[in-house]
Amino acid sequence: KELFQYITRYTPQTVDLEHSLKPFIPDFIPAVGDIDAFLKVPRPDGKPDELGLMVLDEPSVKQSNPQVLSLWLSEESKQHQVTQHMKTVTSVARPQLHPRAVDSWVDSIGALHRSKPPASVQYSRPVPDIDSLMQEWPAELEELLGRLQLPSARLACSLSQYVDIVCCLLDIPIYSSRIQSLHLLLSLYLEFRDSQHFTRRA
């Protein structure tokens, strides 16, 4: 019990420890790739280069392709008008001798396509969302579907009638045009195919 009295009596002391190393955090320097060392040879005519202001300044080890960079900028700015600069398409002379240039172009275009957001469709009429269509059916309905046989593709009906039957079974509304209903049906199929729950069960 006498020991606990010293807890409130103790006063901590601030001790400055001597250290020889200090953390150094440099300022952020905007650059493409490596940090710019500012080791540039000026032009012989004395005119300013305006690198980084009018012309993209990046390391010379791996230069960007102007056409690929223009495609990236047009995708980011949502401006897809073909300008005079975009009309020029680069070509590789004797590509069998320069496979790296061809592979680099294919990889750049592939990365550009992968970065695009998925295409979205604006439905003209209200339709249920994918999450509500993927909800589990009632137990009574699943039991009934287990005893009955769903209509197969050999059903004696037209294609439009078969689409109507399938959409009605999945609670997909059908309006004057079946294109949007079919789009929702195929989107629902892709969601089921890529679902981790059904992948584990398969």
Image: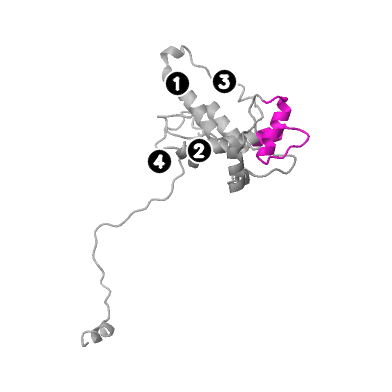
The residue that label 2 is drawn on is: 52
On screen, residue 65 above or below 34: above
Q: Which residue is drawn at 24% across and 84% down?
A: 4
Report whether 88 appears left or right of 121.
left
Label 4 and label 3: CA atoms lie apart by 31 Å
Q: Nearer the viewer, mark 1 or mark 2?
A: 1
> Which amino acid type is shown beneath numbered disc 4?
Ile
The residue that label 4 is drawn on is: 35
First along the sequence among labels 1 and 4: 4
Q: For the residue carrying disc 1, how many other residues have a C-alpha within 10 Å: few (<14), some (14-19), or many (20+)?
A: few
| In the foreground, 195 or 46 | 195
On screen, residue 101 above or below 13: above
Q: Does the magenta stretch include residue 173?
A: yes
First along the sequence among labels 1 and 2: 2
Residue at the far right in the pictured view: 176
Label 2 and label 3: CA atoms lie apart by 25 Å
First along the sequence among labels 2 and 3: 2
Q: Is residue 59 magenta?
A: no
> Which amino acid type is shown beneath numbered disc 2?
Gly
Residue 48 drawn at (x, y percent): 51, 35
The residue that label 1 is drawn on is: 101
Q: Residue at x 51, y 40 (%)?
A: 195
The residue that label 3 is drawn on is: 89
Report whether 141 appears left or right of 12.
right
Residue at the far front in the pictured view: 147
